[in-house]
Amino acid sequence: MLSLWLPRLPIDRIERLREVSSPLAVYGKRSNAELIVALDEAAERLGLHTGLALAQARAMHPHLHAIEEDAEANAALLEKIADWCLRYTPLVACDAPDGLLLDIGGCAHLYGGEEALVADLGERIARAGFAYNIAIAGTIGAAWAAAHFGEPARYACGEQRTLLAPLPLSALRLPADTVAALARVGLKRIGDIIDLPRAPLAARFGTELLRQLDRALGAEHEPLNPRLPVTPYVAEQRFPEPIAREEDVLAVIARLAARLQFALERRGDGARRLELTLFRTDGEVRRIAAGCSHPLRDPAQIRALFVERLTALSDEFDPGFGFDMARLSVLVAEPAPARDQAEWVPVSRPDRAQNYKDRTRSDAKPVPTFADRVLVQIGIGGGEDDAEVDRLVDRLSARLGTRRVRRLIAQDSHIPEIAAAAVPAQTAPADPGWPAFRQFRAEADFAPRPLRLLTRPEPIEAVAEVPDGPPLRFRWRRALHEVIAADGPERIEGTWWSEHGGPARDYFRVEDKSGLRFWLFRSGLYRDLAQGAAAPTWFLHGTFA
């Protein structure tokens, strides 16, 4: 376990943002008192220390420059540093408010050993302008204690007792009142309690004291809660020279996907969601996620997904001075069915350039472009077209976003508003339910419905020849429509146990003189007027193509 402590994180954050005068102190409210929480080196040389009241510090040194702490900004900066530390291990946890914990077991050899890893980490942290302490030990408690109270160094597993014995009891991460109570009976260092009888200690000072001691010594396991979930498959590559071109990034994606392919095939899995993490040389981290409709293993198809994602993020994708490391992770993996997949050759950049040239020609046919929001309605008939449909969904989702490409799924309801649900196409079930829905309507001899309905039925003004008959004319959105043909009614009644109750509806399919076809309904029945019901009203619910 590696513990990284940034003792002057608030000070370093302020100094990186703007020029400030020295000596500098950061203060914050603690129990309704303004206390100093961080100091720079010049302020420490004046004899000030954290926990001192701000008024007292200003009385001692009137020229002290004090700035109120910004806890949210400090936490955001710590999160960014934690993201950057993912280059060393995927198991990184924040130790608020100013530290990080890294599980480097099995990762140190990638940097030439623990000493080389610490040297690389320290050099990068110092170059970014942060003061730091780093310690490595066999347990979280021992590493934390060494970084905060001991000599930052590397300690072999099993040396926790020697490391902890001379340190103060505060190194066990105990509450301040427990440390003060121990001090009153002459127990000030960890070595003072290691060999004492445990029952009297627990009875007088609580079981948390022994629990923290056992965790630091390794007698009890202390789990590390990483910020990000552990991915089932991951491949990464470091570069001797930073890369910045999109072509180089795509080439790296293909190589990393080829490594993942072997591991996925060995376990019979496929990737449903992937994430590309790019580490910039200046410490910034770029994450690009892409999903797919069915489990993928083919490196060419995975690369094609990120072609679309990089195209969609062209304005936001800033390589800076380049990336010195890339990692491709499988966030979600599922068993991949054994099926033959047709060869798919994605569209290359030259093809897109030629397409653009074709669109600029005066004699070229207009090429449809992507709208800002697209609802793709796909009727899947099964067979060989399923793979092509999945690829289309993946490309559209990568370009436009997963929430903008949706598939309609049949629901178990006869109410038109809730008979279908639009869900992200990549996460839609394999069986959308429409064959069974169409069979049910055919057996019941129901009239056809429009493919798309209005978000809400819109009221219209209608005139009918007979009260229960179809309309002769209606006005919708200030336009008058003369009806020349009508079919209906189809009566749909709500359910008393749900919010979709209400009066019965009589639906009609009508066509006007211009050939437009509409789906109208009359809400309410004239026979209910004798019982005090409201007069029926007309609504337009949808249009036919």
Image: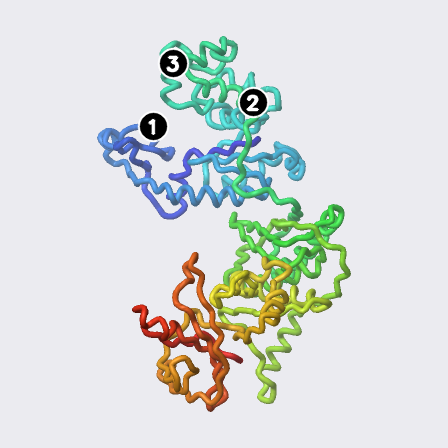
Q: Amino acid at mark 2?
A: Glu
Label 3 SS: helix
At 59% from the left and 78% from the top, the residue drawn is 356
Q: Position of residue 403 (x, y in %)?
A: 52, 61
Q: Is residue 139 above or below residue 97?
A: above
Between label 3 and label 1, give the one nearer the viewer: 3
Mark 1: few/some/many CA within 10 Å (<14, 14-19, 20+): some
| Residue denoted by label 2 | 220
Left or right relative to 332: residue 70: left
Give how far apart the Cα atoms at labels 2 and 3 are. 25 Å
Task: Decide which of tag 2 and tag 1 comes sooner along the chain.
Answer: 1
Q: Helix, strand, or loop for circle 1?
A: loop
Please indicate, yes or no, whether residue 314 appears anywhere in the rendered image: no
- What residue does disc 3 label? 183
When the figure is inspected, residue 444 is found, relative to residue 496, above or below; the finding is: below
Side of 83 relative to 344 (left or right): left
Q: Please state which amino acid type lies under the numbered disc 1.
A: His
Looking at the rendered image, the quarter that the N terminus falls into is top right
Total residue callouts: 3
Above or below for 99 versus 278: above
Front residue of 503 and 42:
503
Dot 2, how many residues are within 10 Å of its Cα: few (below 14), some (14-19), or many (20+)?
Answer: few
The residue type indicated by label 3 comes to: Ala
> Can residue 539 be seen by looking at this rendering?
yes
Query: On the image, numbered disc 1 is attached to which residue?
Result: 49
